[in-house]
Image: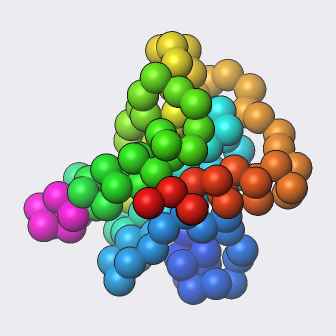
Amino acid sequence: MSGIFTKIIDGEIPCYKIAEDDSFIAFLDIQPLVAGHTLVIPKKEIDYVFDLDDTTLKEMMIFSKMVAAKIKAAVPCNRIGVSVIGLEVPHAHVHLVPINRIDDMNFTKDKLVLSNDEMSAIQERIVKQA
């Protein structure tokens, strides 16, 4: 049975896609800590990030670096924080979070509730970055 991220990859569940290649996809988190919070996942369904083979892990971080640059150019912030937690969804993923202070990476705080229009606007700003 496919997990939620595999259903997103397969187009069964819509997402606010930021970037995609043959191996990875990045999309906005629908329960973001801050506007622009993005998830990067491998298209191959593997539960835990450290179960990825070394090449895939390296390539995922390089893909994440490219996505982070686009987010930083589109969303006012000091940095893009990176977090790997791996408890929420059994599919390896990286959180890329625009941050201005360390508390912006606090996963225990209430998540933002953004409208479809707000999410689409954020997606559009990020996607159009070179």
Main SS category, magenta section: helix
Front position in the image: 37 or 77 = 77
Q: Residue at 26% of width from left, 53% of height from top?
A: 61
Residue 103 left/right relative to 111: left
Q: Does residue 19 sit above or below 12 in this rendering?
A: above
Q: How is the image coloured?
A: rainbow
Residue 2 left/right relative to 57: right
Q: Which residues are magenta?
A: 52-59
Residue 53 left/right relative to 49: left
Is 57 one of the magenta-colored residues? yes
Q: Residue at 62% of width from left, 24% of height from top?
A: 108
| Residue 46: x %, y % from top left | 35, 68
Front position in the image: 4 or 56 = 56
Question: Is residue 68 in sight in this rendering?
Answer: yes
Which residue reaches farthest left?
54
Q: Residue at 83% of width from left, 44% of height from top?
A: 114
Question: Is residue 90 in sight in this rendering?
Answer: no
Q: Residue at 13% of width from left, 67% of height from top?
A: 55
| Residue 29: x %, y % from top left | 63, 51
Q: Quadrant of the C terminus?
A: bottom left
Looking at the rendering, which quadrant does residue 3 occupy?
Answer: bottom right
Is 39 one of the magenta-colored residues? no
Q: How many marks?
A: 0
Q: Quadrant of the N terminus?
A: bottom right
Q: Does residue 69 sit above or below 129 in this rendering?
A: above
Q: Does residue 33 sit above or below 40 in this rendering?
A: above
Looking at the rendering, which quadrant does residue 80 occupy?
Answer: top left
